[in-house]
Image (spheres, grey):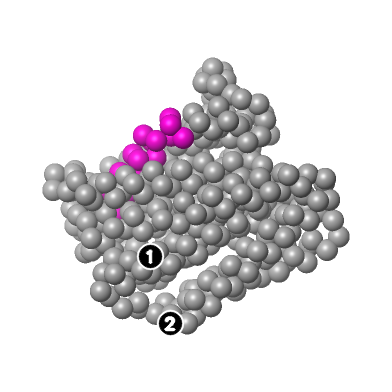
Amino acid sequence: MILINSYFGALLCCIYCCLCWGSWANTQKLVAARKWSFELFYWDFTLGVFLTAALGALTLGSMGSEGLTFFDNLQNMDGSSVMYALLGGIVWNFGNIFLTAAIAVAGMSVGFPIGGGLAWIGGIVFNYLLIVIAGETYPGDQVLLWIGVVVICIAIYICSRAYSKLSSGENRQGGAAKGIVLAVIAGMAIMFFYGLVVKSLDAEYVKGGTGTLTPYTGVFFFALGVLLTTPLFNSVAMKHPVCGDKVSMKDYLAGDMRTHLIGMLGGFIWMSGMVISFMGAGAANPAIAYALSNAAPVVAMIWGVFVWKEFAKAPRGTSKLIAAMFLLFVVGLVLITMSN
């Protein structure tokens, strides 16, 4: 398989992942403009996630001279490692469907900073604990790391205040609460997925790993967990919509090919980021790799605020909150990066 072993290369992998994880929801916005609900979008998104993970395992995971190939790894893996990777996919899928709902209700510039932000700081803590539990010492400046986490927490609070002002100005305070609650649930679930996948991996490839899987095999089983649980999670979402009317599989099958391909493109964008991120996971500790990859809220805010104009109708004074939110997210990201 092909892996990145230099810190600079791993940093580039994390930056690419950050761009992907902060941009995939643009495909959801595109299909929403075509009157395609997020539940219908999610079927195609999930399929794109799985197909991209499988493609990564069959190409990058089977080429090169490092470690085991994907098929060789399938022959010597153990059940507990597979379960950790599958569980990571299940947990992420549960949280991500709430994040997708939050984006449908509140937009990218709110769903991501709150949901993604909580997942960001929670994942940093979780992955930090994995290093400590493994009996290793955190290889960086812990003071800078935790200051960065606190700064991001403040940014998340400011984001919720900005969205409350926007909703108040549009006379939809109930919508504000719904969007924030959905985003919080998403963040509380998503924060655990990365650490679970890391535990499924062989320690030879990433610090904190306790399993027998290579990065590509771990990502494949993660995606399989997503694929297997989408019929359960998304069927519930279709029966209990958070916005709009109920939809059915009949509505999904009536969609045109372009709409389906846009949804699959969203899955490709997200999963390509994860595949590339895990290529360099061994060159940086998991807490930092997760922190940099999950700077996605900053990218999503740029899309939401400047491209989709989600705060265009916000009352006076909201722009100052948005500017402060941007600044604090960037400061937190810089502090976390410096902590390595």
Q: Is residue 147 above or below residue 41?
A: below
Instruction: Say which of 314 and 19 sits in front.
Output: 314
- Which callout, 1 or 2, points to the residue nearer the camera? 1
Secondary structure of the residue carrying numbered label 2: loop
Task: Specify the principal SS of the magenta part.
Answer: helix
Q: Amino acid at mark 1?
A: Asn
Does the residue at mark 1 contact the one at mark 2 (Cβ under 8 Å)? no
Residue 8, position as x, y percentages in the image = 40, 71
Residue receiving disc 1: 127
Secondary structure of the residue carrying numbered label 1: helix
Residue 286, position as x, y percentages in the image = 36, 66
- Could you tell me which residue is drawn at 57 percent across and 53 percent down? 184
Instruction: Say which of 1 and 86 sits in front.
Output: 86
Residue 105, position as x, y percentages in the image = 66, 42
* Residue 273 can be seen in this image: yes
Residue receiving disc 2: 141
Q: Which image quarter is the C terminus in?
A: bottom left
Q: Is residue 214 above or below residue 320?
A: above
Is residue 122 on the magenta stretch?
no
Instruction: Say which of 320 and 30 sits in front.
Output: 320
Is residue 223 on the magenta stretch?
yes
On screen, residue 35 versus residue 6, left or right, reads right
Q: Which residues are magenta?
A: 215-233
Residue 229, position as x, y percentages in the image = 39, 35
Query: Could you tell me how far apart the alpha carbons at marks 1 and 2 are, in whole angstroms?
Result: 15 Å
- Could you tell me which residue is drawn at 59 percent across and 50 percent down? 183
* Residue lying at the far right of the rendered structure: 316
On screen, residue 83 versus residue 162, left or right, reads left
- Which is nearer the N-term, disc 1 or disc 2? 1
* Residue 26 can be seen in this image: no
Instruction: Say which of 219 and 315 sits in front.
Output: 315
